[in-house]
Image (cartoon, rainbow, N blue to C red):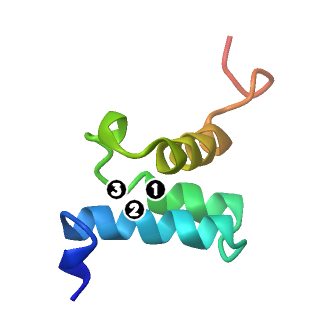
Amino acid sequence: MWRKDYCSEECRRIYNLCVRWHRGVLDPEEAFAELVKCDLERLDNMPDDIREILEDILDLGAPSIEEQPE
């Protein structure tokens, strides 16, 4: 049934991750850990709102300036 709304299982997985993040079900660490396991090859082709959420989650996992080695 879900194939009517999503092009692939990976697309469905990414969308559901975004929904759970947006609803506050996942904390930043959980969201980042799940997202890095996803295939983001087509990130540029995703709708703007989904892409922005994904980029926000990815930014959460990026090391801060203080944490980066010199």
Near mark 1 (Cα within 10 A), the count class, few <14, some 14-19 or many ≥20, is: some
Q: Where, by quadrant of the figure, is residue 59 drawn?
A: top right
Q: Are marks 3 and 2 in contact (CB under 8 Å)?
A: yes
The structure residue drawn at horizontal position 65% and vertical position 71%, both measured from the top left corner, is 26
Return the mark for residue 38. 3
* Residue corresponding to mark 2: 14
**Amino acid at the residue labelled 1:** Leu
**Amino acid at the residue labelled 2:** Ile
Q: Are marks 2 and 1 in contact (CB under 8 Å)?
A: yes
The quarter of the image holding the C terminus is top right
Q: Position of residue 63 (x, y in %)?
A: 67, 32
18 shown above or below 50: below
* Residue corresponding to mark 1: 35
Q: Is residue 46 left or right of residue 25?
A: left
Say which element carries label 2: helix
| Near-viewer residue (67 or 25) | 25
For the view shown, which residue lies furthest in the front direction?
Answer: 4
Say which element carries label 1: helix
Q: Earlier in the sequence, mark 2 or mark 1?
A: 2
For the view shown, which residue lies furthest in the right direction?
Answer: 66
Q: Are marks 3 and 1 in contact (CB under 8 Å)?
A: yes
| Near-viewer residue (28 or 68) | 28
The structure residue drawn at horizontal position 48% and vertical position 41%, both measured from the top left corner, is 48
39 shown above or below 18: above
The structure residue drawn at horizontal position 80% and vertical position 23%, both measured from the top left corner, is 66
The quarter of the image holding the N terminus is bottom left
The structure residue drawn at horizontal position 41% and vertical position 46%, both measured from the top left corner, is 47
Q: Nearer the viewer, mark 2 or mark 1?
A: 2
Q: Where, by quadrant of the figure, is residue 45 drawn?
A: top left
